[in-house]
Image: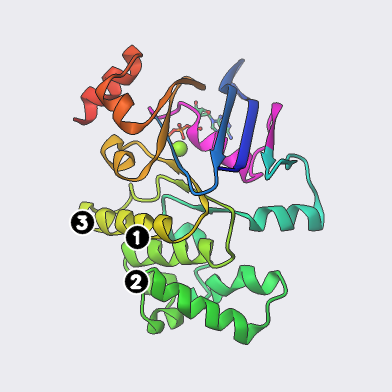
């Protein structure tokens, strides 16, 4: 399988009052096409900071990030826009993906139109993608505040996948939803995963959930990756004490 994303010796520090903390401390990993990689770890362990560096919301203090073998840190302008079409993100709060004053359909079409796709073509693709994500055509004309959290998360998944990204990052994409809706979104992700060959990075607290979706897991603790393996390997035979505690707290 080809490597879509390579993360090498990534470091990010933040100052907290008078001292500096290493939120991400020498982290390296790969995600291959068709693979779903799970990133788990306690609150504050650095998971979202990694996602933010991959999506250029934060810049690394050291290390490299490569998409299809090409370094993507520090890109500017048109080059940056082209690369970041290939990396899409779904956030914890579904409405974060949308401008509250734009109809969902227009929000979903934005990325395509910015990349030069004609309006009629973008609309057609938007409606098809809404359908894939389990929403009927009429949702295109609703505003974000006129749909439920679960529906809005479906729309934000549609918004992310409509531009055919190479990598989809989900940062706690189901944790703000209630349990039954969570299960439906997980089912949608599973369906997407079986149907197309994106690479997925799933950031999640919930080990039971990543077990259902992910091919491989990274366990983070205090900015470092402390364990890697398949979900079953890690859940059945955790090597690190921290991982054992994480598992005990869930199961
Ligand atoms: N912009 C920032 N400025 C200062 N400190 C930050 C900033 N962003 C994150 N941090 C700190 O970096 C550490 C890692 O934060 P991060 O958000 O990556 O954790 P996380 O693993 O995503 O946690 P959670 O599971 O709660 O979402 C935390 O100590 C956090 O307070
Ligand atoms: Mg986070």
Kind of element beneath mark 1: helix
Q: Residues within 10 Å of mark 1 (few under 14, many from 20)?
A: some
> Horizontal and vertical percent for residue 90?
48, 54
Q: Nearer the viewer, residue 36 or 246?
A: 36
Q: Is residue 52 magenta?
A: yes
Identified at 22% across, 31% down, the residue is 250
Span shown in magenta = 41-65
Q: Which mark is residue 180?
A: 3
Q: Which numbered disc, 1 or 2, marks the residue that appears first in the sequence?
A: 2
Q: Which mark is residue 188?
A: 1
Residue position marked by numbered label 2 in the rendering: 134
> Horizontal and vertical percent for residue 216?
41, 35
Quadrant containing the C terminus is: top left
Q: Nearer the viewer, residue 14 or 234?
A: 234
Q: Is residue 93 magenta?
A: no
> Horizontal and vertical percent for residue 220?
45, 25
Quadrant containing the N terminus is: top right
How much space separates mark 1 and mark 2, taking CA atoms?
A: 8 Å
């Amino acid at each position: 399988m080809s490597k879509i994303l390579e993360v090498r010796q990534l470091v990010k520090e933040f100052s907290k009052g008078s001292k500096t903390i290493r939120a991400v401390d020498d982290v390296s990993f790969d995600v291959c096409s068709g693979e779903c990689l799970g990133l788990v770890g306690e609150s504050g362990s650095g998971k979202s900071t990694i996602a933010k560096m991959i999506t250029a919301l934060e810049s690394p203090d050291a290390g490299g990030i490569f998409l299809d073998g090409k370094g993507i840190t520090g890109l500017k302008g048109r080059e940056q826009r082209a690369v970041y079409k290939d990396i899409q993100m779904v956030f914890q709060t579904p409405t974060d993906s949308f401008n509250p004053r734009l109809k969902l359909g227009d929000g979903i079409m934005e990325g395509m139109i910015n990349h030069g796709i004609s309006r009629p073509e973008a609309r057609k693709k938007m409606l098809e993608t809404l359908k894939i994500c389990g929403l009927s055509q009429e949702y295109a004309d609703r505003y974000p505040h006129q749909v439920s959290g679960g529906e809005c998360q479906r729309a934000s998944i549609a918004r992310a996948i409509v531009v055919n990204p190479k990598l989809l990052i989900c940062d706690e994409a189901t944790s703000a939803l209630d349990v039954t809706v969570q299960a439906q979104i997980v089912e949608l992700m599973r369906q997407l995963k079986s149907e197309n060959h994106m690479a997925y990075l799933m950031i999640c607290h919930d080990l039971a959930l990543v077990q259902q979706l992910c091919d491989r897991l990274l366990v983070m603790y205090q900015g470092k990756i402390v364990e890697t393996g398949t979900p079953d390997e890690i859940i059945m035979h955790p090597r690190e004490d921290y991982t054992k505690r994480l598992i005990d707290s869930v199961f």
